[in-house]
Amino acid sequence: MSLIITDDCINCDVCEPECPNAAISQGEEIYVIDPNLCTQCVGHYDEPQCQQVCPVDCIPLDENHVESHDELMQKYLIITGKA
Ligand code: SF4
Ligand code: SF4
């Protein structure tokens, strides 16, 4: 499943450049994650990179976008043009 940024976000901009899928962008008030691009970093890293760097720990899993590891890998292959 993708991750989601909660309103605890302090707009520090640390996570955006760390995302290998360019899934993170500045939203109207806080940073947002595009669920169509977030693979939980599957295909790139063992751990979600945004979670690793967020200083306020405000990027939980998005329960509204449940996906299996295989589905995330398939998304990664499509995004990167390897499918
Ligand atoms: S988990 Fe990975 S792919 Fe998803 S938003 Fe965070 S850094 Fe990007
Ligand atoms: S690292 Fe955390 S606090 Fe900083 S912009 Fe990203 S989600 Fe917001």
Image (cartoon, rainbow, N blue to C red):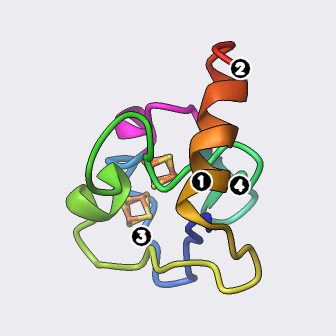
The answer to whether the residue bearing label 4 lies less than 8 angstroms from the nearest atom of ligand 2 is: no
Question: Rounded to the nearest whole Å, what is the CA distance between mark 1 and mark 3?
Answer: 33 Å
Q: Between tags 1 and 3, which lies in front? A: 1
Task: Verify CB contact (< 8 Å) between mark 1 and mark 2.
Answer: no
Mark before the other along the chain sequence, 3 or 4: 3
Circle 1 packing at 10 Å, graded few (<14), some (14-19), many (20+), is few
Residue 20 lies in the magenta-colored region: yes
Res. 10 mark:
3
Front in this rendered view, residue 59 or 13:
59
Sequence order check, earlier mark of 1 and 2:
1
Question: Which residue carries the number 4 mark?
Answer: 27
Amino acid found under the numbered disc labelled 3: Ile
Q: CA distance from mark 1 to mark 2?
A: 13 Å
Give the left or right position of residue 79, taking residue 31 as reference: right
Image x and y of residue 27, in percent = 71, 54
Magenta segment boundaries in residue numbering: 16-23
Mark 3, ligand 2, within 8 Å: the answer is yes
User: Disc 1 residue type?
Assistant: Asp
Q: Nearer the viewer, mark 4 or mark 1?
A: 1
Q: Residues within 10 Å of mark 4 (few under 14, many from 20)?
A: few
Kindly report the distance in space between the C-alpha atoms of the residues bearing marks 3 and 2. Answer: 36 Å
Residue type at numbered disc 4: Gly
Identify the residue position indicated by label 1 in the image.
Answer: 70
Tell me the quadrant of the picture where the C terminus can be found: top right
Mark 2 — residue? 83
Q: Quadrant of the N terminus?
A: bottom right
Mark 2 and 4 residues: CB-CB less than 8 Å, in contact? no
Q: Locate residue 40, reporting x and y percent.
A: 48, 56
Residue 80, given in percent of the width and then of the height, sits at 62, 19
